[in-house]
Amino acid sequence: MYMNKQYNQNKDNIGRLLVQCPDKPGIVAALSNFLFENGANIIESSQYSNDNAQQTFYIRFEFYIEDLINKREELETAFQPLAEEFAIDFAFTYNKYRKRSAIFVSKETHCLLELLWEWQSGDLETDIPLVISNHEDARDIVEPLGIPYYYIPANKDIREEVEAKQIALMEEYDIDVLILARYMQILTPDFVKRFPNQIINIHHSFLPAFIGAHPYERAYNRGVKLIGATSHYVTNDLDEGPIIEQDIERVDHRDNVASLKKIGQQVERRVLARAIKWHLQDRIITNDNKTIVFH
């Protein structure tokens, strides 16, 4: 997205408005006019209307208003009559308030490394106050960056105890996003319920084939021709939450198990990073078990 010099220098004055409502004529005009009347310059606008029985309309605005943070309460209050008129489910977010992300990881560190590199380069617009792991493997990667590393052993017998510690940390660090960067533990329904559309996972895209351990070995034995990855919001339907992003790479008979794993990890890294970026930029609206993603 192109952004002129003024906006780059005053990013704290950038806000976003996400809208979901029944589709009817005049919505775009009404929303655009509202932003104009409140001194906003629209930087980006993306919209979508489905044609099924629901006939739902979705739109995302990114806008610039001078001294936005001091005007935000007035802006949101002024929007209420319009929201009632069009039965709008909406959210205002503000660039000044960066989301705070907790990364959960187990032994495989490829996704963690990708996120930390993106964060260090400034391309992942978030704060990372902590990393949580059920193994010690990633400590030497994380702590030199000044990020606290919490080793919390986990297994099915102590799951509730472990999650109580994790929830306490999420509250202590005021976490907005929980990133499962190959965190190989099943979360309890109570834990997931506490963080709706805030937990983002990554896994290989063979599912529902090759469920469980050693998926690449079994994929190799089956002779698969595509390797993929899926990033999604976590729900209590295991690995079946709203999909944010997917990608694939083609493979063939010359690839062995090791090369399949390497290719799979490369896909996982980029898919998770894209999903996290879109979430941080408020580019995703969920509807039941589907997502609308404004790239």
Image: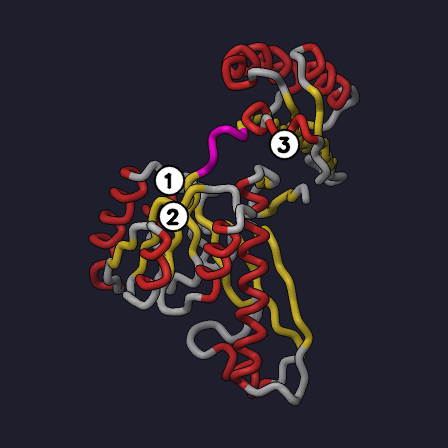
Q: Which mark is residue 175?
A: 1
Element on which disc 2 rests? strand
- Please state which amino acid type lies under the numbered disc 1: Ile
Which amino acid type is shown beneath numbered disc 2?
Ala
Q: Is residue 273 visible?
A: yes
Where residue 270 sits, quadrant-wise, is: bottom right
* Quarter that holds the C terminus: top right
Q: How many marks?
A: 3
Q: Nearer the viewer, residue 23 or 8?
A: 8
From the viewer's side, name the closer residue of 66 and 286: 66
- Find disc 2 in the rendering and name its residue: 102
Mark 3 vs mark 1, foreground winner is: 3
**N-terminal-most mark, 2 or 3:** 3
Residue shown at 56% from the left, 72% from the top: 264
Disc 3 element: helix
Kindly identify which residue carries mark 3.
8
Task: Give residue 58's position: percent from left, percent from top.
Answer: 68, 33
Residue range of the region highlighted in magenta in the rendering: 95-99
In this image, 4 relative to 181: left or right?
right
Height in image: 286 above or below 140? above
Q: Could you tell me which residue is drawn at 62 percent across and 18 percent down? A: 65
